[in-house]
Image (cartoon, grey):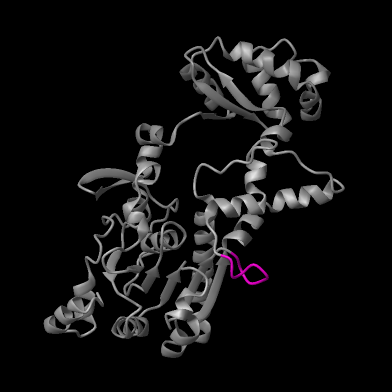
Amino acid sequence: MVLEIKPIVLELGQIVAGPTAGLILADLGFNVIKIEQPGRGDIARYFTGPSEGNFAFFNRGKRSMTLNLKTEEGREIFLKLVERSDIIIENMGYGTMERLGVGYSVLSKINPRIIYLSIKGYGSGPYEDRNALDYPIEVESGVAYMNGLSNKPMRLGASIIDIAAAMFGVIGVLHALLERERTGKGTFIKVGLFETAMFLMGQHIAAYQARGFVPLKPMNEEGFAWAIYDFFETADGKRIFIAITTDAQWHKFCELFKLPICESPEYSTNEARYQRRSELIPMIAETIRRLRSDELIRMLRQNGISYAVLNTPWDLLNDPHASKKLISINYNQKQIKVPVTPLESDTIRYNDADPPELGDSTEIILKELGYSKEDIDRLIIKGVI
């Protein structure tokens, strides 16, 4: 959204969940200030291996300010920032903000309009004091069970729970902003990773009961509702997933590929086809194997049949559609491309500012608060910033 006065967000975020909420708000035009510990900052800055680059993706479009909240002067500066801010985001450990003396009960007295988003491992309840991460939550909520194989639960290939929790958090923040227009007051919003994962598992929780409390197998073993919902290999070695979800699509598909069973009533409905998957899938696979991937894709697309090419995430860098959804940023002396938030609107301008260096805006923000050069030098010496 285009805002004449950008709402100020103070993000005390680590790794994924908190920074994701800040990233989304930055893309929506909010002024996001990332508050980090002096000398170290967000631990994601130092990730290596498969997690290297996480910080770059989750933190573009923000300003960084170092501030030691364990010091009296650090808290004093933070409270001055809160007075002029609109939103707080934090995903610190349970009770951390309260121990530092900057929990919602304190901040709301200083600024009754403040909207405070707290992302924790668990929401209110018997487990609320437990700290957690994405994967343990996947394990406990049933996500890893449904995603894996029998006796082999598996982690999802992305930090889905962290990211989804942040998305729910932003929904709550936007709702609170609307309410604040009406009441003039801010509010406290809490989002649990566990509750987020539980919501994502809602369809399976409901299915278990609807089936008469019959346990479900993991999704990759239970199968899907559709008879033709599977991978097929082409003549040039590509793997294409084909999804046929209506009888009309089936008849079109059947005629398109000249299958010998097109007129057979034994395959006329999805239920009938599902019962005969053991013979149907090999038949289709043999037909598909004679076609090149480009030819198959052209046929499927022209006839409105859903398909997907099996890609790696890095294949998207060169995909003609995906590449339009990437922006270039600089990180660790490299130019890399990262996806934008999936919102399209005439009023949204993606924030393509590079991820901030640690504390890159500390002095600027302090000067905005009225601190002099001498004050800032003193704060540096004392380890406050």
Regarding residue 223, the answer to whether it shows in the image is no
| Left or right: 73 as drawn, with respect to 234 | left
| Secondary structure mostly seen in the magenta stretch | loop
The stretch in magenta equals: 122-130
> Residue at (50%, 22%) from the top-left corner?
298
- Is residue 378 placed above or below 235 in the rendered structure? below
Quadrant assignment, res 290: top right
Q: Residue at x 36, y 68 (%)?
A: 30
Q: Find residue 141 and report its horizontal and vertical position in percent.
A: 66, 53
Q: Image quadrant of residue 5? A: bottom left
Determine whether 373 is above or below 89 in the image. Answer: below
Residue 45 appears anywhere in the view: yes
Q: Position of residue 123 (x, y in %)?
A: 61, 68
Q: Is residue 123 magenta?
A: yes
Percent from the top left, x then y, of residue 27? 37, 59
**Location of residue 235 with respect to 299 vertically, above or below:** above
| Quadrant (top left/top right/bottom left/bottom right) for the N terminus | bottom left
- Does the magenta portion include 94? no
Picture coordinates of residue 369 (x, y %)? 24, 83
Q: Quadrant of the C terminus?
A: bottom left
In this rendering, the count of numbered labels is 0
Quadrant of res 161: bottom right
Q: Judge by depth and name the residue closer to the eye, 84 or 201.
A: 201
Q: Nearer the viewer, residue 187 or 363?
A: 363
Left or right side of 220 for 186 = left
Q: Nearer the viewer, residue 132 or 337?
A: 132
Outermost residue to the bottom = 109
Q: Which residue, as the protein is rendered here, is positioned at the far left?
A: 374
